[in-house]
């Protein structure tokens, strides 16, 4: 009885109080007003630019970092095993994201130390902060891109031959970097397929020699492929190889 009376008293007090009677939900107003000074226009443009960058953040994460190579190699590994949807897509994407953060940690630390923190403390302007932030990312992409791919997009753009890395435009560097990453990922994927392909071939020849043509070879080869992958600690080797491929 005392506990019921105590709960009823609390409910009565909260419902009677005008402060607690309303839901504790913040009110957000978004509107368009006339700019009162040029500074207001500059701030509005910066907010618009930041919102645009946030909307493009997933694409930037995939195209300007190591995510492309990692997710393709992991997908090749699952296809080579022949386990259909094991591991599921959510697990592969999550692992690829965390491996991306791990491999890109030195670059992100440089961006934070050289560009973000000085800009947050009003030590550099926005334009200077963007230049400082892009420098480590450009260095990372130049370390992975092939000169052949850069030359391809330079020729397609009808630009003069750059004398240094600073002369390569960003709209040339990004597609060249993506093409290089695709080539590297497919090379790694091919090497992953070789041992599993050998197992499939041996099982298929064995079944044909035994006259068991109606039995799908995948039913026999799949356990052997999983066993081989577990015995050699396959995920450890693949993750290690991916991490070392960026150094």
Image (cartoon, rainbow, N blue to C red):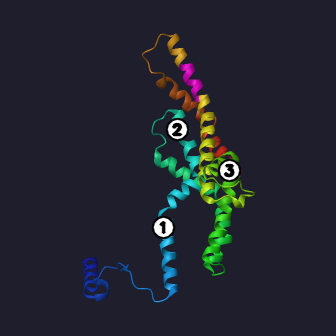
Q: Quadrant of residue 7?
A: bottom left
- State which quadrant residue 202 falls in: top right
Find the magenta span and give its range.
196-203
Q: Nearer the viewer, residue 11 or 50?
A: 50
The picture places residue 247, in percent across and down from the top left corner, at 72, 50
Which label lies toward us, 2 or 3? 3
Write down the residue under mark 3.
144
Q: Are marks 3 and 1 in contact (CB under 8 Å)?
A: no
Q: Is residue 30 above or below residue 96?
A: below
**Disc 3 on helix, strand or loop?**
helix
**Residue 198 lies in the magenta stretch:** yes
In the rendered image, which residue does mark 1 sit on?
Answer: 52
Q: Whole-percent x and y of residue 125?
A: 63, 78
Q: Which mark is residue 247?
A: none
By secondary structure, the bulk of the magenta-drawn segment is best described as: helix
Q: Residues within 10 Å of mark 2 (few under 14, many from 20)?
A: some
Q: Residue furthest right?
A: 163
Is tag 2's residue or tag 3's residue first in the polypeptide sequence?
2
Residue depicted at x 62% and y 55%:
172
From what the image shows, is residue 59 above or below residue 6?
A: above
Q: Inspect this view and state whether residue 23 appears.
A: yes
Q: Which mark is residue 78?
A: 2
């Amino acid at each position: 009885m005392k506990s019921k009376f105590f709960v009823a008293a609390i409910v009565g007090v909260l419902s009677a109080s005008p402060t607690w009677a309303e839901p504790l939900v913040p009110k957000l107003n978004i509107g368009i007003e006339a700019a009162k000074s040029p500074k207001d226009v500059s701030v509005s443009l910066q907010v618009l630019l930041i919102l645009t960058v946030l909307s493009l953040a997933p694409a930037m994460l995939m195209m300007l970092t190591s995510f492309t190579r990692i997710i393709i190699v992991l997908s090749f590994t699952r296809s080579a095993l022949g386990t259909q949807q094991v591991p599921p897509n959510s697990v592969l994407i999550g692992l690829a994201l965390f491996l991306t953060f791990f491999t890109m940690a030195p670059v992100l630390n440089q961006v934070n130390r050289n560009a973000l923190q000085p800009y947050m403390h009003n030590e550099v302007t926005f334009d200077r902060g963007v230049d400082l932030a892009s420098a480590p990312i450009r260095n990372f992409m130049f370390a992975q891109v092939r000169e052949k791919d850069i030359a391809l997009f330079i020729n397609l753009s009808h630009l003069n031959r750059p004398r240094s890395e600073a002369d390569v435009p960003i709209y040339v560097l990004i597609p060249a970097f993506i093409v290089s990453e695709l080539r590297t990922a497919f090379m790694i994927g091919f090497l992953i397929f070789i041992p599993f392909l050998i197992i499939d071939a041996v099982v298929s020849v064995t079944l044909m020699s035994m006259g068991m043509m109606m039995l799908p070879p995948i039913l026999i080869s799949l356990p052997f492929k999983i066993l081989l992958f577990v015995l050699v600690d396959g995920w450890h080797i693949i993750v290690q190889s991916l991490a070392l491929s960026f150094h």
